[in-house]
Image (cartoon, rainbow, N blue to C red):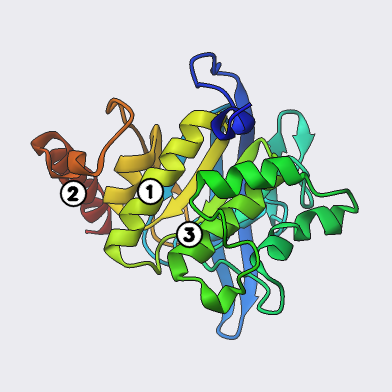
Amino acid sequence: MNAIGALGSSRANVTARTKMVVEGASKFYQARSGIVHALDNVSLEVKEGEFLCILGPSGCGKSTLLWSMAGLHGLSGGRIRLGQEPILKPHPEIAMIFQEANLLPWRNLEKNIELPFELKRIPPDKARIKALLERVGLKGFETKMPRELSGGMQQRASIVRSLAVDPSVLLMDEPFGALDAFTRDEMNLLIQEIWMETKKTIIFITHSIVEALFLADRIVVMSARPGRIQEIVDVDLSRPRGVDVQSTPEFIERVNAIKAMIDHRKA
């Protein structure tokens, strides 16, 4: 089996079955300035194999929602399910990629990728890790330390680390926001390709309308705090999408429409 075959097959047979459900999610937390109302009655269904982007301004609660979907934050009200199973703590079917790569500086690339296996006390899947490293262009860097890798390479490593344990859901919290524009385009192309190959359900947080339109099947537009779902936008652009699609009149028109929608709600 080749590297791509080791990651998954085509998306042709993806069903529309519901994968995750958010029901009436609300979140309050204590800050120095007082009680913060982060989320207000958010309800959402995520389909199996869907690429869903959650878009909104800074502080709108989108990361709070994602962390709750990962089982890393408790809700003040409502619930989150994976299938019929409540998500109350981290789940083996759910992996998360953060804004920073969070590689341990004292471990080389290979040892960083093997960390989730160590935490689960299971042997690392060497064949899958090898295929993934080759797929993202990191073959030959296994013994490099994080300080020897560029920001883009570190984020590639974090993608491999998350996919190595073969989760069915991948949560991504603005993972490319700190990268330069050229590297960000490369990473968006890469994650689109991996998603099309593996059929993973991906929920991707961003504050970039362009990034959301480029990646998503659907875009959940959130309001300013307290975070509510303002609109859900279907994206029917054909795939695979090249970076050049972003300069087409159709794409620019959609960007402006979403921007106008957000600006109207702010007014």
Of all residues, the one furthest to the front in this rendering is 140
Q: Amino acid at mark 2?
A: Ala
Which residue corresponds to mark 3? 175
> Image check: 230 left or right of 30?
left
Q: Quadrant of residue 157?
A: bottom right
Quadrant housing the N terminus: top right
Q: Amino acid at mark 1?
A: Asn
> Image check: 53 left or right of 141?
left
Q: Quadrant of residue 132?
A: top right
Residue at 21% in and 50% down: 259
Q: Nearer the viewer, residue 126 or 252?
A: 126
SS at mark 3 in the image = loop
**Within 10 angstroms of label 2, few (less than 14), some, or many (20 or more) residues?**
few
Which residue corresponds to mark 1? 188
Residue at 81% in and 53% down: 117
Percent position of residue 173, x then y: 52, 57
